Structures are given as C-alpha cells and as structure tokens.
C-alpha cells in the first residue's frame, strides 16, 4: 500500500537500519552481544524469503516460546523484521531459538509442485535468477542486468505495486529510463490466459506496448513443474555428470554457445542466487563440455536453467542425464518440487519436459514496445 503521503513503497523496508559488520564478526548492539546463538541461527536466513522463527517469550506469557512464519523483510545487528499473515513483527535476534528458510505456503490441493500459487512461484523463480540491479515497487520487482535475458531485465508484475496502476507504470518506465534500458513487464496468468484481459496489460497496450514485444519466444512462456521423485534415475550407462558450486570458465564458454552473454552481467546473474550448481557432461574423447545446465537451489524447490546440449550430441540422452542428476541432487537435499521455464513455441522442449513428468503450472508473457 502507499504510505500516508501517497508515495510508493519500494519493497521491504528495513525498519531497524542496515545490516552491520556483526554479520561477519562479533559486535555489541542495543540487544547485547551480537555473537549469540540466536544471531548465528538467523545469519543464514534469506532476506525476502519465507522463514519460520522459534522465538523465546517473556515469563508469564503462558508458554516458553512461539513460532513466527512469514517473509523476512529486514535484518540488522539486533533485530529481524518478519511479515506474517496478520502483522509485521520485530524480533530480537538474541532471543531466537531456531530459524530456517521454508518453501512458499501451499495454496491449493495437490502434490508439492502443484500446491504453490503462481504469484509465489514467480517470486521464488526470481530468486533463482537474480538480477544485477533490482528494486521493489510495492510487491512488484524491478530488475535490470545490462540486457542479459528477459527475466533479469523486466518488471515482475505480481501483487500490489503500492500505487495506482498508471503511476506505477510511470514509475517503472522512469526506473528503466534512468538505467538506459527499455521498460519490459513480465505478466503471468493461468494456462491459456488472455493477456489483454489483465488490467496491467490493458493499460500498457493503450501506451503502445505489445504482447511479446516483437519476439516470438516472448509471446507465451510456460512454467512447468514436476516432482523430483518422478524423474528417471541415473543408470550405469549414464554419462558422468560434474556438479560445480563455482562458475568455471569452460562452463561459461560452453553456455555462450547457446545465447549471447553480457560480460560481467552474465556471471553476476548466474552466480547471484542463494545457492546454485553448474552441471556439465563432457565428451570422453575430447574432454569438452557437450551438455550443461544450472541448478538453482531453494528450500523445497530446485530450478533448472539453461539446459543445453551441443548440436553434435543431441538425441543421445545427454539432456535426460543432466536432468536426472539434477533431480538426484534435489531428492538428496529435501527438494521434492522442481520448476523449469520453456517458450511455448518450443514444441520439442515442451515434449521433452512432459516426458520427464513435468506439467504446465502457469504461463507468463513479456509486454514491451516493439523496439525493446
């Protein structure tokens, strides 16, 4: 919502002040020694993610502790700010007894990969592909990364932008203009949704924007999800798969064969999530990378980005081997749900994921001026 002056709220506000050196070393603050068990337990929580925090209560409150579940919007030396369903709470870090990131809440029936809402899954996927420059406009997320990929250079339209729609679009256009980038809006809906029926898209069309922004692959992007347990396991005949926690130069060089890269921005996006693995398969004869993918790691979820196989090695099972390895990592690390994003015009790609047990969760499109 707007503040009392009608100005936008720019995402979660740190009501306690910025994080300090106490995150990496002892420091005494208003709540006491910052090197308490509670501080160590909360140091690994992800800002912007859903968390559960067990919190010590004062004597006489009828219980020794209670749990708070919600979005962690801020953290500094002494305090956490957590948005629960009913209120925003300010918690003393020294009084935290346990804390961890947790998956988005279930909002509908089904298996783990089906229960999450489209809004929550979009926000989760944005954390798996973090833009270099990002800002909040209420619930909207404004992202820029030097032109590297549509996801990292578009405004994620989700929830309430905290301003009337026209003013929110004005603000977004100026934000991108200030960065010498075209304004691109990512808008999602249920499978088969009509973009023009959404208020944001209708308002953009009136300003001369077009659905897809002149790119066929942007017209309709499918978000497909599936159970990690449903992906076929690796076999004795599967090619060896390497999983690197760090981005290696030969992986990046092979990745550049499938799409243009932007030096600096590409590396920042690929390594910008809270956790990721770089998977690869090599040709045993030349040791060159012939297949790769990036695995984004979330509480309860794993996301696959950039799956690619060298043209000379396609239809040999390399892609399936890489996905099987990713699913094995997911199963072993308590991530029952997986997601991918594939252009709706990529019929072969959609069929590949369908064969591995993935189904369409929802769709999104980009809305931009044709020159974008």
Image (cartoon, helix red, strand yellow):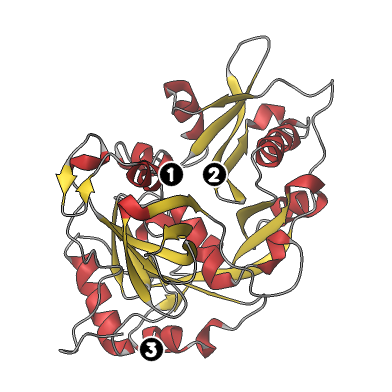
Return the residue at label 2: 297
Q: In which quarter of the image is residue 91?
A: bottom left
Q: On the rendered image, what quadrant is the C terminus found in?
A: bottom left
Q: Is residue 199 above or below residue 301?
A: below
**Helix, strand or loop at mark 1:** loop
Quadrant for the N terminus in the image? bottom left
Residue holding disc 3: 203
- Circle 3: element type: helix
Q: For mark 2, does the 10 Å Cα neighbourhood hold few (<14), some (14 to 19), or many (20 or more) residues?
A: many
Q: Residue at x 66, y 35 (%)?
A: 329
Q: Name the residue carrying label 1.
A: 274
Q: x, y (%) of residue 57? A: 40, 64
Q: Decide if residue 371 is in sight here.
A: no
Identify the residue at image location x=53%, y=82%.
195
Q: Where does residue 194 sit, x and y in percent of width and height?
A: 59, 84
> Answer yes or no: do the residues labelled 3 and 1 have beta carbons within 8 Å?
no
Q: Nearer the viewer, mark 3 or mark 1?
A: 1
In front: label 3 or label 2: 2
3D distance between C-alphas at marks 1 and 2: 7 Å
Q: What element carries label 2?
A: strand
Image-based side of 145 in relation to 280, left or right? left
Q: Is disc 1 in contact with disc 2, using a CB cutoff of under 8 Å? A: yes
From the viewer's perspective, tell me whether residue 298 is left or right of residue 90.
Answer: right
């Amino acid at each position: 919502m707007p503040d009392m002056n009608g100005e936008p709220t720019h995402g979660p506000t740190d009501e306690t002040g910025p994080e300090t050196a106490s995150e990496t070393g002892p420091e005494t603050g208003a709540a006491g020694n910052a090197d308490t068990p509670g501080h160590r337990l909360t140091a690994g929580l992800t800002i912007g993610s859903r968390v559960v925090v067990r919190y010590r209560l004062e004597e006489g409150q009828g219980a020794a502790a209670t749990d708070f579940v919600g979005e962690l919007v801020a953290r500094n030396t002494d305090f956490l700010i957590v948005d629960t369903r009913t209120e925003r709470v300010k918690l003393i870090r020294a009084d935290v007894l346990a804390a961890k990131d947790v998956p988005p809440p279930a909002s509908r029936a089904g298996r783990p990969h089906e229960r999450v809402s489209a809004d929550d899954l979009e926000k989760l996927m944005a954390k798996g592909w973090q833009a270099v420059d990002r800002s909040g406009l209420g619930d909207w997320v404004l992202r820029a990364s030097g032109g590297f990929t549509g996801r990292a250079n578009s405004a994620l339209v989700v929830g309430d932008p905290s301003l009337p729609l026209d003013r929110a679009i004005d603000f977004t256009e100026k934000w991108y203009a200030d960065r010498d980038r075209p304004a691109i809006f990512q808008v999602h809906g249920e499978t088969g949704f009509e973009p023009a029926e959404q208020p944001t898209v209708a308002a953009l069309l009136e300003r001369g924007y077009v659905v897809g922004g002149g790119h066929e692959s942007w017209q309709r992007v499918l978000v497909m999800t599936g159970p990690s347990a449903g992906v076929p396991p690796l076999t004795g005949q599967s090619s060896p798969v390497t999983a690197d926690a760090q981005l290696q130069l030969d992986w990046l060089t092979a990745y550049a064969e499938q799409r243009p890269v932007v030096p600096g921005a590409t590396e920042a996006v690929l390594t910008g999530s809270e956790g990721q693995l770089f998977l690869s398969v090599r040709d045993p004869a030349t040791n060159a990378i012939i297949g790769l993918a990036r695995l984004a790691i979330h509480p309860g979820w794993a996301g696959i980005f950039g799956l690619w196989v060298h043209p000379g090695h396609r239809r040999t099972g390399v892609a399936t081997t890489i996905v099987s390895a990713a699913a094995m990592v997911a199963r072993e690390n308590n991530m029952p749900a997986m997601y991918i994003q594939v252009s709706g015009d990529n019929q072969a790609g959609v069929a590949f994921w369908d064969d591995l047990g993935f189904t369409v969760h929802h769709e999104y499109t980009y809305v931009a001026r044709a020159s974008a």
